[in-house]
Amino acid sequence: KAGVTQTPRYLIKTRGQQVTLSCSPISGHRSVSWYQQTPGQGLQFLFEYFSETQRNKGNFPGRFSGRQFSNSRSEMNVSTLELGDSALYLCASRDGSSPLHFGNGTRLTVT
Amino acid sequence: AQSVTQLDSHVSVSEGTPVLLRCNYSSSYSPSLFWYVQHPNKGLQLLLKYTSAATLVKGINGFEAEFKKSETSFHLTKPSAHMSDAAEYFCVVRDGATNKLIFGTGTLLAVQP
């Protein structure tokens, strides 16, 4: 089985722009979660989607949004980028209550 | 509220010596606990999980962890470190109420030749 695939791997954007990150979960996994990882804050939960519905949400501003499609693929969008949004964004999928399986992440740099 | 505390931010060992990475948890429920490893510029990989079966849990790459309820601990160990074990390790608890995963701050393991 292919693992969790995140695209792109690296991204450089300018302040004020918006960005869309993509995640393809493991086949058969219906739950997709997103995390932000920074050296200062560690791993922080963004949101979780299940069957196209947001099931859980972390404490991030409304500039961070996501969605899930009928094939379980997910996207997250960050609008009006700030320097502090520079981070590794990790996507993870799971089946039921199984442990999370993570992708290799998208490294976003905001200049 | 559930939480995890990783007691060491950095641990350095010599190749071939034992590894001990410490984790304490706080939980109102019977917890589900996990250890994940992250190599540079990679995602997190599951090492092992505890879900109220055996208290000694064996994982991949020779790692194991022991759940000690009396000490609220879930320390990760390995008898003999290998250079390839150098990575960051995260202790994680699942919040039983929300099903969210709560990550520790990570322990960076260095392995000296």
Image (tube, helix red, strand yellow):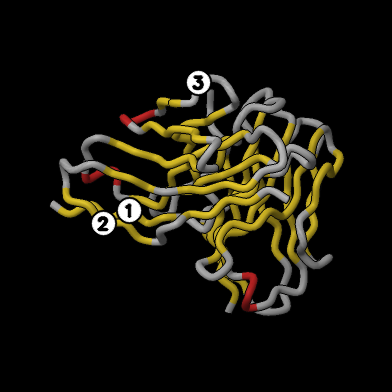
Q: Are marks 3 and 2 in contact (CB under 8 Å)?
A: no
Residue type, label 3: Ala
Write down the chain letter for disc 2: B
Q: Whole-percent x and y of residue B62? A: 31, 30
B20 relative to A51, above or below: below
Mark 3 or 1, which is nearer the eye? 3
Residue type, label 2: Ser
- The residue labelled by disc 3 is B54
Q: Are marks 3 and 1 in contact (CB under 8 Å)?
A: no
Mark 3 or 2, which is nearer the eye? 3
Tell me if residue A73 can be seen. Answer: no
Q: Are marks 1 and 2 on the same chain?
A: yes
Front residue (pair B107, A42): B107
The crowd level at tag 1 (other Cα within 10 Å; few <14, some 14-19, many 20+) is many
Residue visible at 75% across and 50% down in the picture = A47
Residue visible at 30% across and 36% down in the picture = B78
B106 relative to B33, above or below: below
Horizontal relation, residue B49 to residue B18: left or right? right
Sequence-wise, the earlier of marks 1 and 2 is: 2
Report the number of numbered marks: 3
Residue type, label 1: Leu
- The residue labelled by disc 2 is B12
B17 relative to A27, above or below: below
Q: Secondary structure at mark 2?
A: strand
- Give the alpha-carbon distance from disc 3 to disc 2, as whole Å: 29 Å
